[in-house]
Amino acid sequence: MTKSEKIKVRWGFIIFFTPVFLWLFLLIVLPQIELLRMSFLGTDFHGKSGFTLENYGSFFTEPIYWLTFARTALYSILVTFIVLIIALPVAFYITKLAKIKYQGFLMVLILIPFWVNELIRIYGWIILLRESGVINYFLLKLHILKHPLEMMYHDATMILGLVYTSMLFMIVPIIGVMESLDDALIEAANDLGAGKVAVWRKIIIPYCMPGIMSGSIIVFMLVLGSFLTPKLLGGKNAMWFTEQIYNSIIIYFNWNQGAAFGFLLLFLSSLIIFIVLKLTKQELSKVIK
Amino acid sequence: MEIALSIKNVSKNFGNFTAVSNVTFDVEDGKFFSILGPSGSGKTTLLRMIAGFYKPSNGVIEIRGMDMAGVEPNKRPVNLVFQNLALFPMMNVYENIAFGLKRRGERGKEVKKKVESMLERVGLPGFGNRKVNQLSGGQKQRVAIARCLVLEPTALLLDEPLGSLDFKLREHMKVELKKLQAKVGTTFVYITHDQSEAMVMSDHVAVMHSGYFEQLDTPQNLYNKPVSAFVAQFVGDNNKFIVRLRKDEHGRFFAVTDEGHEFKLDRPYDLESSNLFEMYVRPEAIIINPKESTGGINLLDVEVKSILFDGGNSRILVIPSGSGREIIVSLPQNRKYDNLQEKDKLKIGWYPSAAVCFKGAGGKVYDEI
Ligand SMILES: Nc1ncnc2c1ncn2[C@@H]1O[C@H](COP(=O)(O)OP(=O)(O)OP(=O)(O)O)[C@@H](O)[C@H]1O
Ligand SMILES: [Mg+2]
């Protein structure tokens, strides 16, 4: 490469990446830095504001906060797990069993729900599930139920909603990996004495691990940070952690507390992902690929 | 000797297409049995039925006398080496070989001992920790075979395992595989479309053509006594002549070409329905400049068209005078014809016993070969 070419390349780099960099910096990094600064600020008894760890401290000292977080994290893990259990056979069916001409159609079926806005989708569900809703109406008509059943505001309903909303983000990366799985590997395992369970445990799942991991990370983060579904469908007397943040900022006008919670959410969820990656001996770089 | 594998009248239809049609054969314990056929002749289909991946439409498959109908592939005492090997990429060599043993519930030291002795046997000691993608083509081959052999199957089924290797390695692996089979004594059922692979390695070869077995015989008999025009063309090289047969008043048979050349034959043929035949003569059965005195030999005047030098397998292409047909003639190893030139005039000849005729379909060529 000659010197002038080198310079040309560098100019191209600068022209293309300046907008990207500015966008990242101004709209994402800068506000985050400001939020980070705010999360360490507090007002003392005299109304003077200054540096404090109080905002973070209250998360650990007030059980309501860390219990909410624990509940949110546990439910998110549960949802991720349920999504995974459903996504694996679905992806397997689409890539390996369905006829090629139906594969596209099946993918569209999975995509369709995402053409509808989340809020509209949830209101649709409310119409179906509420006490005077469509499902109760038919169950009563068919004399299966004597009294209408309240199906809203249960954790189970909320989990159902979260599973449904995040399914796509698990299926797509798994299909991506599973497509490259040679059918002969499955047959070879079968030939060497593996039954159905062993084929899944020893061949399909290990082979699809990068897809499973990236799908799980996306779904986990998505569920952990979701707001509408838990708020509208979830149980009345328990909160999602995002609601805590929302409440701190919007209801109590405590931006400092809200910012601290936001960073705790980011840090703790990253920690959970890190631990899971370590436990399953996966490498982040491979998963991202 | 015990029968390891017995196939009785097995057929397989895909819709209304018959891929394997009424095939019957037995393989004795410890034998190397090959199925030789062109692409699409139904070899893989037959092998997959034995392994249990396809259900036969008709017929019975028995392994050591046990009917295999309804037995899943993972419960059959045979193992298949896949055309593309299908080694597990997420496991190392050791885990690949131990896979089958672990599925049987074997654990611990026993597994380690078996895997290591197997690696030793296939000439890969100390390769256990290698990743599959760190192996050469020939090494992968041996791991795929080791992975099956460690289970001590009644029969090892191999689907063109040398197909993906380059020529030199294939030649090498041919010999290796034969040696390995002799050493372990396992029954091999080997599929190939390469006649030389089948001939070199096998005790018995079945020649398969569009779903049928054309001939099942020893390699020597396939070569020397083909029972059909297809076998004559497919196994080894052959010169084909389209001829009309004629029987003279003494009951002797002659083959007459379109150009009017007449060749003596040494055995009778049935001329009733048609006298249109294909005559086959092997390149090495043709003698260059035979002594005129050797009576009974068929003679032909030819001109050298080209010389195909290939070391010990050198041949020449010749054309009979007044004809466009090419005849391949092997050159003897004694270097007597080193000075042969193109356009040289020669006399070639063959004994009537070297020619074999089959009722012809009027010059139909098996163009898939
Ligand atoms: N699952 C299937 N459905 C329909 N037809 C099939 C199927 N499998 C094979 N066939 C057909 O059966 C015939 C035999 O196929 P097979 O794979 O047994 O050939 P083969 O002898 O192994 O060929 P090759 O040497 O190319 O591997 C082919 O014409 C093929 O198109
Ligand atoms: Mg095949």
Image (cartoon, coloured by chain):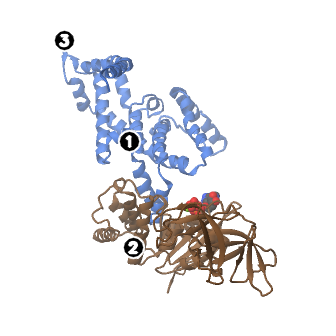
**Are tags 3 and 1 found on a single chain?**
yes
Residue B313 vs residue B143, the one in the foreground: B313
Q: Nearer the viewer, mark 1 or mark 2?
A: 2
The subunit carrying tag 2 is B
Residue under pointer 2: B180
Q: Secondary structure at mark 3?
A: loop
Label 2's element?
helix
Residue marked by disc 3: A48
* Residue under the image location 66 percent in, 83 percent down: B296
Is residue A251 in view from this perspective?
no
Q: Nearer the viewer, residue A287 or B34?
A: B34
**Is residue A39 depicted above or below A189 in this figure?**
above
Q: Say whether marks 3 and 1 touch (CB < 8 Å).
A: no
Direction from residue A8 to residue B45 in the image, left or right: right
Disc 1: which residue: A77
Callout 1 and callout 2 share a chain: no
Left or right: residue A207 compared with residue B223: left
Q: Which image quadrant is residue B15 in? A: bottom right
The chain holding disc 3 is: A
Tag 2: amino acid: Leu
- Residue at left offset 40%, top offset 41%: A216
Gap between marks 3 and 1 measured at Cα: 41 Å
Q: Is residue B147 left or right of residue B247?
A: left
Ligand 1 is in which quadrant of the figure? Answer: bottom right
Q: Which chain is blue?
A: A
Q: Answer with the quarter of the image where residue A269 lies.
A: top left
